[in-house]
Amino acid sequence: MLNKLKRTLATAMVLVSCTAAFAQKTKTVEGGGTSVALSSGFVAALQSLGVTPGTVEPTKLQNGKASFPINGGALDLKTLKGEIIHIGGLTLTARSTEVRLQAFIIDTTGSAPVLTGLVVVNGGLLARVPLFDINLSRSSIKLAGDDLTVRGVGLTLDKTAAAALNQIFNVSAFKAGLPIGTATVTAELD
């Protein structure tokens, strides 16, 4: 009985040690924001299709730059795997069709980083889909205290989003890989 108790305590101590070790490198994302300098190619493509961009509150769109507040998530500082959750979003309007792309999540937990979002068409929720593929090859990462800044994040249109937008707007102009813009993510960690 004493040996069983010792083994149980030893197992519990190992689990606590492992849990503490993993917990130390994963931080909760408490706030911050992501700004995206929209590419001129993306803006020109929208204009040529007669699609007007707008925002879902509290997103701001000024001088070709969209700013999305961050309101949650978690990030492993050792591997940079995690999710960064945003509020707000973008609208794309043509004639009587309004598409809202909102509730963005930067997801680096899979084999390739992606930004997903909810797609809402004329008030009806379709699904959460991959919207933009993320390219980190030219990015810089800086951690100062509890503030993480990632600059130079490339965003291109994901094939799933391209297919959905082509179907919704009855066009064939949205192509996978279309440059969307360059993002800067500033996350406040706890």
Image (cartoon, rainbow, N blue to C red):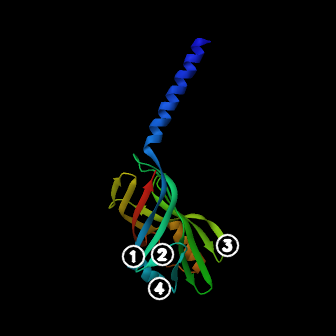
Q: Which label sits in the foreground, 2 or 4?
A: 2
Mark 3 to mark 1 CA distance (whole Å): 28 Å
Mark 2 to mark 4 CA distance (whole Å): 19 Å
Do residues under tags 2 and 4 come within 8 Å of each other at their CB atoms? no
Mark 1 to mark 4 CA distance (whole Å): 13 Å
Circle number at residue 39 = 1
Q: Earlier in the sequence, mark 1 or mark 4?
A: 1
Q: Amino acid at mark 3?
A: Gly
Q: Earlier in the sequence, mark 3 or mark 4?
A: 4
As drawn, is 118 to the left or to the right of 110? right
Residue behind mark 2: 60
Q: Amino acid at mark 2?
A: Lys
Circle number at residue 106 = none
As drawn, is 4 to the left or to the right of 133? right
Q: Secondary structure at mark 1?
A: loop
User: Is the N terminus in the top left, top right, bottom left or bottom right quadrant?
Assistant: top right
Mark 3 to mark 4 CA distance (whole Å): 24 Å
Q: Earlier in the sequence, mark 2 or mark 3?
A: 2
Residue behind mark 3: 124
Do residues under tags 2 and 1 come within 8 Å of each other at their CB atoms? no
Q: Which label sits in the foreground, 2 or 3?
A: 2
Do residues under tags 2 and 3 come within 8 Å of each other at their CB atoms? no
Q: Earlier in the sequence, mark 2 or mark 4?
A: 4
The percent position of residue 2, horizontal first and vertical second, equals 59, 12
Q: Closer to the camera, 93 or 147?
A: 147
Q: Which label sits in the foreground, 2 or 1?
A: 2
Q: Residue at point 48% right, 68% down?
A: 68
